[in-house]
Image (tube, grey):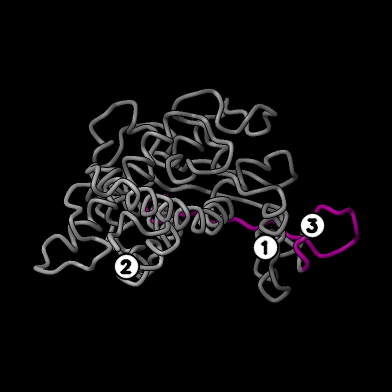
Amino acid sequence: MEPEDMRPSAIDAAMRACVPTDKLLKLMAIGLEETIETMLDNPVASTDVCTLLVAYTPGTTNSYPRYHVKLWHDLVAVRVLQRFNVLSSPPPVFRNWIFLGDSTGARRRGVLMHRLMTVNRECMGRGTRVLYEGVLYYLCNKQLPGVSASMVQPDGPAPEMASAQASNYYALRIERKVSADGLPHDGRNKHCVQAYKRICLYVMAGTVLDAFTNTWRHNWGANVLVVVADTLRAMVVDETFEWYSTAPADHPAGPGTWRMLLPSRRARVSSDIRVQTMPEEEMQQWGDE
């Protein structure tokens, strides 16, 4: 039976046998880096290289992240085809399918793109949690006592790419109140302290990309890390952004809809407790309030 005549479930099984998830994740990391690199020279696209990571959140209609996530997944799909087109005898499921848009591979293309979307969605939970606990918690909870986030160098020119890591320009100072049970704001009498730290958004950029692709050994290029760090920095310095808006998270249309990157409300409750938790022995270094 020709691959195009197979049931979608059979096509999917054959593709999974040829491209296991771990190999597909590596290709997704490569494709994501290529996508971000294409956005660098666009003055609009370069301001937001993050919302494409969650563009397949159910209900999203914003054409900006949807366009760029499609570009990302198309680049990954092309790489998948290239892996087998160079073989003298490709696996049957990839046979007679040279280009992604070929009509001879229409059904297989649909199956492959659906798998990419599924893998992307499976990574979104971890990715949004890492981003929220590392940065967005401090932007969304400034109404809580002791919670703050500010750039060490809010103004001035950006450093050279080679000096980006550990520079004041990408240094974020974050503060929060902590307790042993992670509930420092519940009004009960307990030991709470004010904890703070300085993080580098250039380093955080790599951590976020790793989480959203579930890969930990991809060597992200410095240009990609810088533009992701710039996007994270934009979230911090824009004090007019309405994190508490009741409008749909992907509105208004276009780049900069940062609320798309927030975890679900249930996930945020768990993350809030983790961020606000510190063992008693560690709290001793901060002293009492």
The span picked out in magenta is 181-203
Which of 170 and 74 lies nearest the eye of the viewer? 74
Task: Count neighbours of disc 2 (C-alpha within 10 A) and say few if under 14, some if 14 to 19, many if 20 or more.
Answer: some
In the rendered structure, the answer to whether residue 103 lies left or right of residue 15 reads left
- Which is more foreground, mark 3 or mark 2? 2
- Which is more foreground, mark 1 or mark 2? 2
Measure the C-alpha gap from mark 3 to mark 2: 47 Å
Residue 8 screen position, x and y as percent: 42, 57
Q: Secondary structure at mark 3?
A: loop
Task: Count neighbours of disc 1 (C-alpha within 10 A) and say few if under 14, some if 14 to 19, many if 20 or more.
Answer: some
Report the residue at 73% width, 73% height from top: 280
Residue 208, placed above or below residue 90: above
Residue at the spot of label 3: 184
Task: Kindly identify the amino acid type of the residue bearing the numbered disc 2.
Answer: Val
Which of 255 and 204 lies nearest the eye of the viewer? 255
Q: Secondary structure at mark 2?
A: loop
In the rendered structure, the answer to whether residue 270 lies left or right of residue 175 reads right
Measure the C-alpha gap from mark 1 to mark 3: 12 Å
Residue 117 screen position, x and y as percent: 44, 50
Res 78 label: none
Residue 190, placed above or below residue 132: below
Q: Secondary structure at mark 1?
A: helix
Task: Count neighbours of disc 3 (C-alpha within 10 A) and say few if under 14, some if 14 to 19, many if 20 or more.
Answer: many
Residue 262 screen position, x and y as percent: 59, 45
Question: Pointers 1 and 3 in contact (CB under 8 A)?
Answer: no
Residue at the spot of label 1: 274
Residue 38 screen position, x and y as percent: 24, 38
Task: Kindly identify the amino acid type of the residue bearing the numbered disc 1.
Answer: Arg
Measure the C-alpha gap from mark 1 to mark 2: 36 Å
Task: Kindly identify the amino acid type of the residue bearing the numbered disc 3.
Answer: Pro
Residue at the spot of label 2: 19
